[in-house]
Image (spheres, helix red, strand yellow):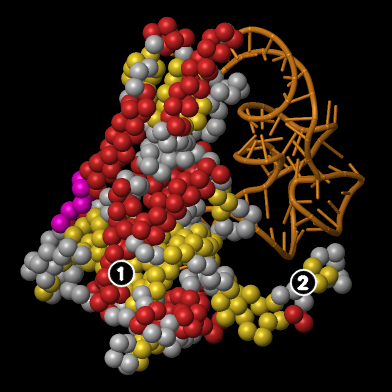
Amino acid sequence: MKKAITPRNEDYSQWYLDIIEHANLAENSVVRGCMVIKPYGFTLWENIQSALDKMFKDTGHTNAYFPIFIPKSFFSREAEHVEGFASECAIVTHYRLKKDPNSRGLIVDEAAKLEEELVVRPTSETIIWSTYKNWIQSYRDLPLLINQWANVVRWEMRTRLFLRTTEFLWQEGHTAHATRQEAIEEAERMLNIYAKFAEDYMAIPVIKGVKTPNERFAGAEDTYCIEAMMQDGKALQAGTSHFLGQNFAKAFDVKFLNRNNELEYVWATSWGVSTRLIGAIIMTHSDDKGLVLPPRLAPTQVILIPIFKTEEEKSLVLEKLNNIKNQLLNNGIRVKLDDSDDNSPGWKFAEWEMRGVPLRLALGPKDLANNTIEYARRDTGEKQSLSQENIVDNVKNYLENIQQNLYNKALAFRESHTFDANNWDEFVEKIENGNFVWAHWDGTTETELKIKELTKATIRLIPLDIKSENGTCILTGNPSKHRVLFARAY
RNA sequence: CGGGGCAUAGCGUAGUCCGGUUAUCGCGCCUGCUUUGGGAGCAGGAGGUCGCAGGUUCGAAUCCUGCUGCCCCGACCA
């Protein structure tokens, strides 16, 4: 038996790591801060990708690919962008190794020094806008709606599997528009797509909003975000969409002729989600028995477990289960039959629970005699013996039900951990206990930073569906016209 | 970069203070038999440059010196 999963309430971050290990999602690689995404974890990512990719394409976007290397000078074109990323870049300085004359090893060949260093992309705005300059001349070239699936590198000081790794996988959309209004609409459209994906596929309720200037993306005029609550009450930013104004157009001199034959700078957006979403799924739904996956994204939605003693029973049970498997496959359900001889049914139950498979069907001699089959759902642990009739419909109902239940549970959890705070003591107490807190803020970065210093809470967002309400800042007592969302965050 | 810790089989570890035959145990792995409705049992077996390099010693996982790597806490962040 593998080492048990550390309970959530004992050590939340160890629990998180144990889930990843036991569910076979990923592991640390020999390279510090970089993870190996194992087949099961990567299939989950592929399912995320394909659902999102369809949503992007349905809204008119197409995929393209830009280089992983970006000339260093590109980063200094946009002042805030440099500042945001300079401190966490991997840089290529040479292109050749040679034999070390003093040992059997290899050393960098100093003769092969690059004239201009190349930065391994931490994000692709700069290389993409330098390319867009050549692609855009007229209003007829707009809007330009492009997405790229890629890896990026940010040399973070401390890393955690999926949540923050040195290299991570993501998608980044980069769009160009003729008007300010159109670009803002695009940024909001993509935020809504992220929110819909989070809620409909990941079963994670999110709050939509705008970042404060302090939390804004380097080079953006506005950063929109969705924030989700994890089971320890901390916030996780699950997606961002930026209205970039004309900052990158100006930095890379991207202009177009409008209908009136006037030269104008292009308006831009960029938006992205990453493998961090897998961390969000883990931390939202899983329990002390292991991973819990939402059916719509689970690599395996249904696991079939045979139970038998004799060879004769075995062949009858397997025949039945293969038949069921084919019915489910023909109906587009991702199903797997665990017919290995190596492990007992009990072992298989535990194993597939740990790996988060939403629904388990077990069939043994008793079921053969009674024409029944046992349904066991991962989210509630509930087991039910049903007739073998209507398996496809039953399974579909179960999966739909589990998907909905996971969302409802996560929403109920968030709601029971969200409060209004009207004075400082109340604010500190609610933050300390791991909650989302709506509170008044005087709108200054100074106050925001002071609150962060005192409580480790940050302003997660200013809500999109803002409710006007006169109040006074939780810290300074200065007037405020609406509440903002505070929480400790990942 | 500051502070703390660790390095022994694929993984987790005992032994290190106080040097002494063949380096401990569990998991996992291999073979066989019995098992299989909630992580099976028994028997046998394979697997080690004790992080690296020096030194002390008749003798080093153990003592000394240097190096390297990793983990945790803080400053940075999708």
Camera-near label (1 vs 2) is 1
User: Which residue is more in the foreground, B46 or A251?
Assistant: A251
How many numbered badges does the structure rendering display?
2
> Where's the C terminus of chain A, which quadrant?
bottom left
Q: Which chain is home to disc 1?
A: A
Element on which disc 1 rests:
helix
| Residue in front for this viewpoint, A47 or A451 | A47
Left or right of B6: which side holds A414?
Answer: left
Q: Is A104 drawn above or below residue A91 in the view shown?
A: above
Farthest residue, direction bottom: A262
Tell me the quadrant of the picture where the N terminus of chain A can be found: top right
Stretch in magenta: A415-420
Mark 2 Cα shell of 10 Å, populated few (<14), some (14-19), many (≥20): some
Residue at the image position 15 percent from the left and 65 percent from the top: A466
- Quarter-of-image position of residue A261: bottom left
User: Disc 2 marks which residue?
Assistant: A97
* Amino acid type indicated by mark 1: Glu
Residue found at x 44% / y 10%: A368
